[in-house]
Image (tube, helix red, strand yellow):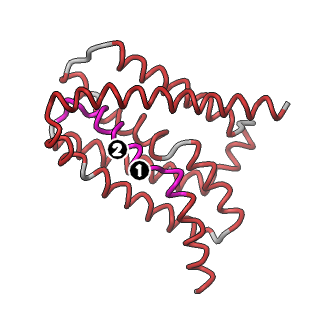
């Protein structure tokens, strides 16, 4: 039992850092700029379910799928980074109508919020490394606890949105999209670096 709790603690910390819920919250607010509270809450629930199933599926099948398809983590980084960069650029350069954003809420909950922002290459790579070092039960539990913490942080999104108001959310949206573009470039850079180092 002592070993289990030790494994739980040692696996909890790297997953918590990789998930970075506090850093993702501004992007959540930016993506849901024109949504009402109910729509934002629904989007967060869908994002949590997406992240949960993706994380658990990756723990169970990730290594096998990557080996069978010949996919490296670096490939995942570059692909995810490119898609995120396109999304951020589109949001920065165009003015989207509120109705269109609300209609896209379910899709936004899956991508980019559920993945790769909540559970992306950093979290998936961390999980792969952890299941080689610690008991799988401890890793799964630490992942679920981290998702619960992320959900609790995201649940404050409606309060923060009410405090900021429409103009504050519009400003936060543009800043969040710049952050998202920067995260995308970082993912692409790390992926390309890993690919070049493997040559």
Marks 2 and 1 close (CB-CB < 8 Å) = yes
Q: Which mark is residue 25?
A: 2
Residue 25 versus residue 127: which sits nearer the camera?
Answer: 25
x and y percentages locating residue 16 in the rendered image: 49, 58
Q: Which mark is residue 96?
A: none
Quadrant containing the N terminus in the rendered view: bottom right
Magenta stretch, main secondary structure, is helix
Would you say residue 165 sits in the magenta stretch?
Answer: no
x and y percentages locating residue 56 in the rendered image: 53, 56
x and y percentages locating residue 145 in the rendered image: 43, 65
Quarter of image, res 135: bottom right
10 sits left or right of 34 in the view: right
91 sits left or right of 119 in the view: left
Q: Residue at x 42, y 57 (%)?
A: 147
Mark 1: secondary structure: helix
Q: Residues within 10 Å of mark 2 (few under 14, many from 20)?
A: many
The magenta segment is: 15-35
x and y percentages locating residue 116 in the rendered image: 49, 39
**Residue farthest along the bottom direction in this orientation:** 1
Quarter of image, res 94: top left
Q: Residue at x 39, y 49 (%)?
A: 22
The residue pinned by badge 1 equals 21
Instruction: Judge whether 142 appears above or below 102 on screen.
Output: below
194 sits left or right of 34 in the view: right
Q: Residue at x 79, y 29 (%)?
A: 196
Quadrant containing the C terminus in the rendered view: top right
Q: Residue at x 49, y 46 (%)?
A: 119
Residue 127 versus residue 68: which sits nearer the camera?
Answer: 127
Q: Residues within 10 Å of mark 1 (few under 14, many from 20)?
A: many
Mark 2: secondary structure: helix
Q: CA distance from mark 2 to mark 1?
A: 6 Å
**Residue farthest along the right direction in this orientation:** 199
């Amino acid at each position: 039992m002592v070993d289990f709790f030790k494994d739980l603690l040692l696996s909890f910390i790297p997953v918590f850092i990789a998930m970075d819920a506090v850093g993702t919250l501004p992007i959540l607010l930016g993506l849901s700029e024109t949504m009402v509270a109910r729509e934002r809450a629904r989007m967060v629930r869908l994002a949590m379910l997406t992240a949960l199933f993706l994380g658990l599926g990756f723990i169970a099948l990730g290594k096998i799928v990557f080996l069978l398809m010949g996919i490296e983590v670096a490939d995942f980084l570059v692909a995810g980074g490119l898609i995120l960069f396109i999304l951020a650029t589109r949001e920065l350069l165009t003015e989207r109508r509120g109705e269109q954003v609300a209609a896209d809420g379910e899709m936004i909950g899956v991508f980019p919020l559920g993945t790769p922002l909540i559970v992306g290459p950093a979290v998936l790579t961390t999980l792969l490394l952890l299941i080689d070092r610690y008991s799988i039960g401890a890793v799964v539990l630490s992942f679920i606890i981290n998702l619960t913490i992320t959900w609790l942080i995201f649940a404050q999104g409606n309060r923060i949105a009410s405090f900021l108001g429409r103009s504050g959310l519009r400003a936060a949206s543009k800043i969040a999209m710049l952050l998202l573009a920067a995260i995308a470039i970082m993912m692409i850079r790390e992926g390309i670096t890993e690919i070049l180092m493997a040559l």
